[in-house]
Image: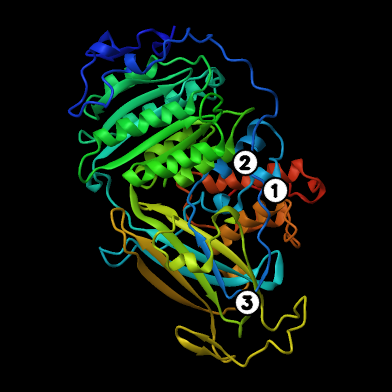
Amino acid sequence: MSIFRLRPLWLLAGGLLLPACQQKQSTEPLEQASVYEQLPPAEPQLDEAPPAPANAETYARLPENRFEDVRQTPLSTFAIDVDPASYSNVRRFLTQNRQLPPPEAVRVEELINYFHYDYPQPRSSDAPATLNAEVARCPWNPAHRLVLVGVQGREVATRALPPANLVFLLDVSGSMNDEDKLPLLKASLRQLVHTLRPQDYVSIVVYAGAAGLVLPPTPGSQPQQILAALDNLEAGGSTAGGEGLRLAYQVARQQARPGSNTRIILATDGDFNVGESSDEAMEQLVTQERQSGVFLSVLGFGEGNLQDSKMEVLADKGNGNYAYIDNLNEARRVLVQQFGGTLFTLAQDVKVQVEFNPAQVAQYRLIGYENRLLAAEDFNDDTKDAGELGAGQQVTALYEIVPANTRPAVDPLKYQSSPGVATDYGPVSAASAELLTVKLRYQEPQGSVSRLLKLPVRNSDTGVEQASDNLRLAAAVAEFGLLLRQSEHRGTASYAAAGQLAQSVRGRDADGSRREFAELVRQAGELSSEVAQALPEEQWSYR
């Protein structure tokens, strides 16, 4: 029997199992006296929940971004997105299931942002990020240009990060009983526990038929107590996700200390089926609670009933990250190697706005970010929620643009044309070599007034083969994503071409992610109708 199913709920303290009502609380007591009082007097839940139906995974259906006419829509605005979930989920489909992922599961911007790029660090110690850009010919449509926009968050040494107040909110319902769910979840969090510092605190809240506190705030100097609480968890019962979220926020708020970074880490397959379960209700709850300064990150596990769309909504609205954990290596990457970026916010409500020069650009298309688009006026609105940038994190976006000298799909309007376009820099003439201007707006984690960065970008006719490793890698990943998504804008894209472009990148591959990517492209090529065009396996070794 699991710790969670005992009545009253039992907690581990000092090597002994004690009833929750006898467990001493941390320095700040919870609003309710004990977990025992929070459990409803209902009959115990069955040990196992009914099996989930086959193919019950859910993904949001988002229309692909279209080409925009620069004279009608000169501004492109979006909130940053650093979630890596889609890439690791795509990997699961290709390597474990031996099948192509459903197109809805492919968020191209998340594929691109899974990789590390060589962007410079901010020169000023008070600047949280740098802006970077590059232009080259588009590999799947050489008549077009591909523009890379890169943001590099400032690296912060782990020892210099503020204290962490972490609440693990763990789904221990019956649907989490598979090996790739609760067992992998526990093994993943064990890795994080070993990286905690004495000033960091961890609490554990679990939910199944009801929600309960199984570990009060415990310092990182006592890892064995945290690990013991994790080890004793078992799966069973239904899924009271809404109740678990409310209790987790209560614990997080009352343990928050001045200067600390307070975050809930929700680990689940996303199957909320008791209580507050609709996307709208959960979104409203998280939106209300984020005003308290508590961020919410989500870790997704398992297959068969993965509720991807629901988990992405919770992370986005909770000012946090969403990662899908398909193996222990991914857990180590997200929770250990990227400890600062995943758990510590450097800048919040980060928005990007690109202004295109109509003298140089006829049309443009933002690749991905379909669920991150903002209205032009949202860029200067500091009350508009946007994405968060963690310590050392990067953001990469790609635009495919149609040069002004390319024959347009529709002739220019005779009565709408004008000799020049006024901008905040003055009128832009046809002689200007500026292609566009990138603007980045952000707020400090505890601030309310935003700051602005700008970067003008000049035109270039460089072939993609001569572009930097940054642009070639991003282009290869984008081409791969366009094919998986069955994009109507994929042009002459092919898995073979994406693989060749990826292999041309000779940058560092310390974690093996680039080598792995080349193998994923090869596998996707074999699984697609393009088998005859795929390169022989011996030619896919990553350099």
Q: Which mark is residue 90?
A: 2
Rendered location of residue 24, percent (x, y) = 20, 18
> Circle 3 — which element?
loop
Earlier-in-chain disc, 2 versus 1: 2
The amino acid on which the numbered mark 3 sits, given as a three-letter code, is Val
Q: Residues within 10 Å of mark 2 (few under 14, many from 20)?
A: many
Q: Which mark is residue 484?
A: 1
In this view, the mark in front (1 or 3): 3
On the question of residue 333 being in view, the answer is no
- Mark 2 to mark 1: distance in Å? 9 Å
In this view, the mark in front (2 or 3): 3
> Circle 1 — which element?
helix
Colour treatment of the image: rainbow
Quarter of the rendering containing residue 340: top left
According to the picture, the residue beneath numbered tag 3 turns out to be 70
On the question of residue 220 being in view, the answer is yes
Earlier-in-chain disc, 2 versus 3: 3
The amino acid on which the numbered mark 1 sits, given as a three-letter code, is Leu
Left or right of 120 on screen, residue 17: left
- Mark 1 to mark 3: distance in Å? 28 Å
Q: Residue at x 44, y 74 (%)?
A: 455
